[in-house]
Image (spheres, rainbow, N blue to C red):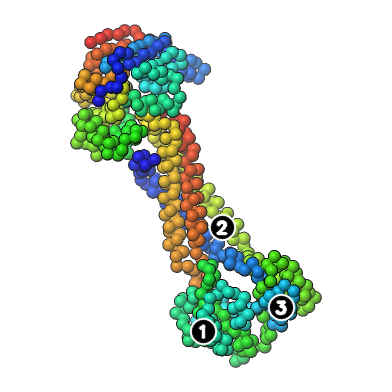
Amino acid sequence: MNSPTTAGALVRIGNVEKVFRRGSENVHVLRDLNLTVPTGEFLALMGPSGSGKSTLLNLIGGLDRPTRGTVEVAGERVDNLSDRRLAGWRARHIGFVFQLYNLLPVLTASRNVELPLLLTHLSRDERARHVAAALELVGLGHRTGHFPRQLSGGEQQRVGIARGIVTDPTLLLCDEPTGDLDRKAGDEILDLLQALNREHGKTIIMVTHDPHASARASRTVHLEKGQITDQASQ
Amino acid sequence: MLPYLHLVWSNLMRKKARTILTLLSIAVAFLLFGLLAAIRIALTGGIDVAGADRLITRHKVSIIQLLPRDYKEKMERIPGVALAAHQTWFGGIYRDPKNFFMQCPVEPEPFLAMYPELLLPDQQRQAWLRTRTGAIVGRKTAERFGWKVGDKVPIQSTIWTLPDGGRTWVFDIVGIFDGKLRNTDTTALFFRYDYFDEARQRWGKGQVGWYTVRVKDPAQAAGVARRIDAEFENSSYETKTEPEGAFVQGWARQIGDIVLITASIMTAVFFTILLVAGNTMSQSVRERTGELGVLKAIGFTNSTILALVLAESCLLSVAGGAIGTGLACLFTAHGDPTGGILPLFHFPVGDRFIGLGLSLALGLVTGLFPALAAMRLRVADALRRM
């Protein structure tokens, strides 16, 4: 599960601005923001609501485009890719973990994890092997045939993480991964993310409100009103 | 698309009751399509098997007015006419009024020469020529009443009486004919005109119902028709001659424009089903905007999303269409449900394929707008709706 990228800066955000139009008003969500994330780092993005941390995560993940500035991931400019190429790029490079797990309720755990693999050229057996390995890694090898409604919140988030890592992406982006979990389940998820970072070298960027969660990261960046106000390494 | 089949199926099964109800609505629409196609064929199918080289000559005023028997020879002298054969409506029933089917007295030789699509073994043909009270009957009616060669069958005429005032005519079944084509009507019974004309009471003697005329060159049929009508103009029995297809169509039009009626009903049914299925698909896509956002986030392209939604609507629609078409095949498999009024009642193979094609088109149309909406979703916006 090692990232194929070379050592050095994996993510480079250069002078990024993001402006949303709300009615007749322009809302500046990100202002002249610069950030570099080295390969293998576990970075926490913190800040109050509306500070722009989720927007920044969306820009890095190619879900949105900056109004100005550049977003470079693994040596590739993603801010000027077409929708089609961006979708392909996301499939190859990005794993997403969402606050509300965002599993498809009509699919079992293994089918949910398999979804990103449907976009690859892997055979059915190869996909099944990858799915089994990912679910084993998150400790859910025994729950593969369960539907999301049959799983606890923590287990659903583990499935979400398995889906995020099953293609062995370059970068794992987590948006409040413990935001909907109790402390115990949250800690287990943070243990898992930490293990993915330390033992498998996965580069992780995690948005969180929770100082307890950010303490698990190797660096924390604070955002306020669309700008970085503070950075601290643990 | 094969790897995504499970995803498409799971989405359809998300709300089973809704999917099943929509499926049933579509199935009922296609069942109706099949039954209406069978009724249309039953009422207009004779047009398809009508000979291009055959004309029908009837009384100018109405089909129920009779024509002289000796018109046959006069017609055969008209340039372009190859052969003329007459028939007369007998209007009989077998035991019960519901056992209605067509019977006509005819002259065997010209009649069989006129209708080569009626297949009668030579031995039975010879027996008919020998037997004055002999009759030949189509395979469907013979099977319906369990008649076989050698049986004597009593038919009560609603029009023609015997010299003793009775209405029960007894015929000897000397032959059973089959149809050369699927659409050939094999429900009728034909018996000898000489026996009929001699036995009936005074009214109508020496007269016949209508003539079928074979022309030498089908391209000259219109000219021959005009010549026939001109021949009998200003006589007591003026004629109206038209192609056999138009004559059959005229019969069907007594009920109404069948094609227009069935097309109108089907348009209304399909428009309704379009709204029902379209609403189901739109609702289904709206409910999972967030999930579509997730698929896009993990790398599904816009075109893949479009194809997934279209596949879903097409699968639903084609499944409903196949069920409805299958039921229509089942319901029409035993042929005429009326016991004789609709002898050609069947669901043609061509219409079955049209039905399946329509179901696919229905799926594409009902899925198109929800699919386009899903395709155009912005990922970040869609994820917020999770």
Mark 1–mark 3 Cα distance, whole angstroms, equals 28 Å
Q: Report the residue at 55% width, 79% height from top.
A: B189
Is circle 2 on the same chain as circle 1?
A: yes
Give the residue number, with chain letter if any, for mark 1.
Answer: B123
Residue type at mark 2: give it: Thr
Q: Secondary structure at mark 1?
A: helix
Res A217 → quadrant: top left
Mark 2 and mark 3 in contact (Cβ < 8 Å)?
no
Give the residue number, with chain letter if any, for mark 3.
Answer: B76
Mark 2–mark 1 Cα distance, whole angstroms, equals 44 Å
Mark 1 surroundings: few (<14), some (14-19) or many (≥20) residues within 10 A: few
Is circle 3 on the same chain as circle 2?
A: yes
Q: Nearer the viewer, residue B116 or B206?
A: B116
Res B292 → quadrant: top left
Mark 2 falls within which chain? Answer: B
Q: Nearer the viewer, residue A52 or A196?
A: A196
Q: Nearer the viewer, residue B294 or B24?
A: B294
Q: Is residue A41 above or below residue A93?
A: above
Q: Is residue B81 above or below residue B316?
A: below
Residue type at mark 3: give it: Glu
In percent of width and height, residue B365 lies at 50, 43
Mark 3 falls within which chain? Answer: B
**Which is more foreground, mark 2 or mark 1?**
1
In percent of width and height, residue A8 lies at 30, 13
Left or right: A60 in relation to B191:
left
Q: Is residue B53 visible?
A: yes
